[in-house]
Image: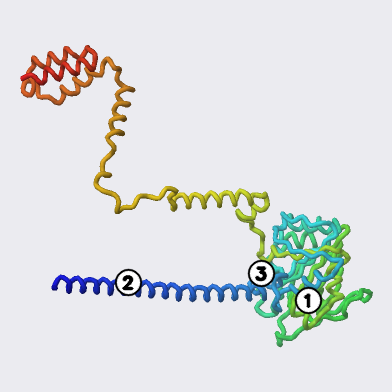
Amino acid sequence: MNQTTNHKSQMTNHESQITNHESQITNHKILILFLLIIFSVFMIGMVRLFALRFETGDVYPKYSSLRSDPLGTRGFYESLENLEYVSVGRNFLRLSDMRPEQDTTIFYLGINVYQMKSADELSLRHFEEIAAEGGRVIFSFFPVKRRGFTKKLKKISSLPLADRWGINFSRFEPDEKPDTIKKAQKVLPEKDLPYSLSWHTALYFEELANPWKVIYECDGHPVIIEKQFGRGSIVFSADSYLFSNEALQKERYPALLLWFMGKNTRVIFDESHLGLREQPGVAGLARKYGLQGLFWGILLLAGLFVWKNSTYFVPPPDDDALTDDYDFASEKDTTEGMVSLLRRNIPPAEILGVCVKEWEKSLNPGRELPNEKLEQIKALTDKDPVRGYQDICQILSKK
């Protein structure tokens, strides 16, 4: 009776343990599901946040053609893209790697004035070559404030830009009302351009050489200038606001923008000077040289390697079925190995002598075996191994 009661109590305890274990597993699954939901919501939020950032384009530098907020130039880019006779593109390569086609207009918008003034001879020569082949290069500069403008411009003098192209930079004197928007007036009346423009920078050009043609002035200082190089030309605009999305919405000057583009039907917006450069990695090089098949082959081999190391083609034996009989090596394998070793290293006629010598090393001479019997056994090593072994056994069996 007591045994039956104990057995029932053990069964009850076992069932309660099973129930507790199942509840722990259920709680663990619920926790994992809850964490997965939180992680999924977090990832969806991050993807949405990045999508919004890239849609507005504020992750890109100011005056980039990839930026669609007021400080970008994406509106101008897409406006040209909608024209049937104009092909538009972006450049992410370095200046030395860029090879534009002939009769192409290249826009360098939002350039830092210090960066331009420090340009080297090689860069200026490259721009000249583009213009000489019929290209048109447009440089517009990042707006400069009237107050807080450093004297670094004056320190950067007698550089290739001033010596080779005959152009220098300066700024308007600070106004009592720094937020006042100035006006730029057209200099050449014969051109079909707006008479005046709102001007949002304190930068202007000075010390111009004779070939430079002034298109607009602000307070008597050149702010938009042009110079012919061979079949093409180079244009400088002290302000980039004209090309911004904000300007296209509030102060649109389509005739002036078309004049900047010129008669060329190919337009390139350079992004490399803003820091957006193409830096191909392994994937880019693989696409360039057509190595996609090699990539998929390596991926397949990696998958097969993982499968080989994680899956048994022949199911392993059950651990519960193993007994102590499996703890020793096969006697047949051991014997065959010894026979094979002896056959490769000892001639048949010498096998008995070698065995006697090894056996003799384990003996204590004069005690375990009389010397007479040992001499008799040594004398039998020249006989046939089988016959000699039988005679040795008879000698050892005699008392």
Residue 287 vertical position relative to residue 79 in the rendered view, above or below? above
In the rendered image, the quadrant that contains the N terminus is bottom left
Which of discs 1 and 3 lies nearer the camera? The answer is: 1
Q: Residues within 10 Å of mark 1 (few under 14, many from 20)?
A: many
Q: Residues within 10 Å of mark 2 (few under 14, many from 20)?
A: few
At 35% from the left edge and 75% from the top edge, which residue is drawn? 23
Per the image, label 3 sits on a secondary structure element best described as helix
Which of discs 2 and 1 lies nearer the camera? The answer is: 2
Q: Amino acid at mark 1?
A: Leu
The residue pinned by badge 2 equals 21
Label 2 vs 1, first from the N-terminus: 2
Residue 190 vertical position relative to residue 276 in the rendered view, above or below? below
The residue pinned by badge 1 equals 242
* x and y, in percent, of residue 358 in the image: 19, 23
- Quarter of the image where one finds residue 169: bottom right
Q: Nearer the viewer, residue 105 or 200?
A: 105
At 71% from the left edge and 87% from the top edge, which residue is drawn? 177
At 75% from the left edge and 62% from the top edge, which residue is drawn? 161
The residue pinned by badge 3 equals 152
